[in-house]
Amino acid sequence: MSERRFALVDFTSRAKTGRLSIYEAGRTHSLSQAVAHAATKRELVAKQRPPHWTPPSIFRQPEVLTEVEVIEAEAELKVLQRHALEVVDPETASSA
């Protein structure tokens, strides 16, 4: 599943296949959920273009979203999904 995100800055990310993906600032890209989550945490992307956004300097080096960050984001998303699907027992919740 992919998510569309607006790139605030230029950044790169390496896919599980080993392919390097380059995301250009000022464009909307289709990202995997894990990459979107990791990039959002680093403030590299936004759901849509912010009203007063200005492009970064052409002299700014692209940010690098590491494979470790993407793996951690993927694990975090799995935990969040598992938590969202848990059945809450009202009796247990009221006694806590």
Image (tube, rainbow, N blue to C red):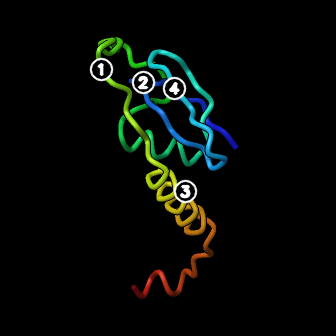
Return the disc, 4 or 2, that comes first in the chain's sequence.
2
What residue is pinned by disc 2? Answer: 10
Compute the Cα span from label 2 to label 3.
22 Å
Q: Earlier in the sequence, mark 3 or mark 1?
A: 1
Disc 1 versus disc 4: distance between alpha carbons? Answer: 14 Å
Residue that badge 4 annotates: 23
Whether tag 4 and tag 2 are in contact, CB under 8 A, the answer is yes
1 and 4 marks in contact (CB < 8 Å): no
In the image, which is nearer the foreground, mark 2 or mark 3?
Answer: 2
Q: Earlier in the sequence, mark 3 or mark 4?
A: 4
Residue on which disc 3 sits: 74
Element under disc 1: loop
Q: How many marks?
A: 4
Where residue 30 sits, quadrant-wise, is top right
Quote the CA–CA distance across marks 3 and 1. Answer: 28 Å
Question: What is the secondary structure assignment of the residue under circle 2?
Answer: loop
Horizontal side of residue 61 vs 69, given as left or right: left
Q: Nearer the viewer, residue 7 or 58?
A: 58
Q: Nearer the viewer, residue 75 or 69?
A: 69
